[in-house]
């Protein structure tokens, strides 16, 4: 398989993964709206014996949301690495001019050390 075909296959796979991520996020948005409604009706001072219990319940809900965001961030960072590899190779052929506005670094999408 040629390098160009491999890159094209990587891009097609990335596009498919991004579409699936969009579908997951859409479902999560619907679920989040339901959780928000439930939380607004059930997580209040009258439903708990103490403030500590209310805080624990709120923190457990928050923890799940943070884990979801962290997982999606790791997934997107992996996809970014693949895309950077494909786009980085094109920049070499074009003399370093590309999406990075003339620099070989490209876009800065946060901490690259992860």
Image (cartoon, rainbow, N blue to C red):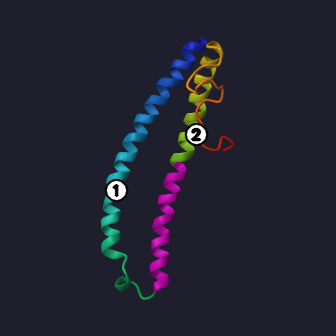
Please name the residue that numbered disc 1 is placed on: 31
Where does the image place residue 78, in percent across and percent down from the top left? 58, 37
Residue 18 horizontal side relative to residue 103, left or right: left
Tell me, yes or no, whether the highlighted magenta stretch contains residue 54. Answer: yes
Tell me the quadrant of the picture where the C terminus can be found: top right
- Residue at 32% x, 59% y is 33
- Give the residues in magenta: 51-71
Q: CA–CA distance between discs 1 and 2? A: 28 Å
Mark closer to the observer (1, 2): 2
Where does the image place residue 73, in percent across and percent down from the top left? 54, 46
Q: Is residue 17 above or below residue 30?
A: above
- Answer few, some or many: residues within 10 Å of disc 2's Cα (few below 14, many 20 plus, some between 14 and 19): few
Where does the image place residue 53, in percent across and percent down from the top left? 47, 82
Q: Quadrant of residue 49?
A: bottom left
Is disc 2 placed on a helix, strand or loop? Answer: loop
Residue 49 horizontal side relative to residue 100, left or right: left
Residue 8 horizontal side relative to residue 38, left or right: right
The kind of secondary structure the magenta stretch mainly shows is helix
- Answer few, some or many: residues within 10 Å of disc 1's Cα (few below 14, many 20 plus, some between 14 and 19): few
Is disc 1 placed on a helix, strand or loop? Answer: helix
Tell me the quadrant of the picture where the N terminus can be found: top right
- Residue at 36% x, 79% y is 44
Please name the residue that numbered disc 2 is placed on: 109
- Residue at 60% x, 43% y is 110
> Which residue extends farthest bottom?
49
Where does the image place residue 5, in percent across and percent down from the top left? 54, 14
Tell me, yes or no, whether the highlighted magenta stretch contains residue 94. Answer: no
Q: Earlier in the sequence, mark 1 or mark 2?
A: 1
> Which residue extends farthest right?
113
């Amino acid at each position: 398989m040629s390098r160009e075909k491999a890159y094209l296959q990587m891009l097609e796979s990335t596009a498919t993964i991004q579409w699936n991520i969009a579908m997951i996020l859409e479902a999560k948005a619907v679920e989040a709206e339901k959780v928000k409604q439930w939380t607004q009706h059930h997580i209040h001072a009258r439903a708990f014996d103490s403030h500590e219990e209310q805080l624990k319940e709120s923190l457990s809900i928050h923890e799940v949301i943070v884990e979801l965001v962290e997982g999606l961030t790791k997934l997107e960072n992996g996809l970014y690495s693949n895309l950077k590899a494909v786009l980085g190779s094109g920049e070499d052929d074009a003399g370093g001019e590309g999406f990075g506005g003339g620099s070989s670094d490209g876009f800065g999408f946060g901490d690259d050390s992860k």
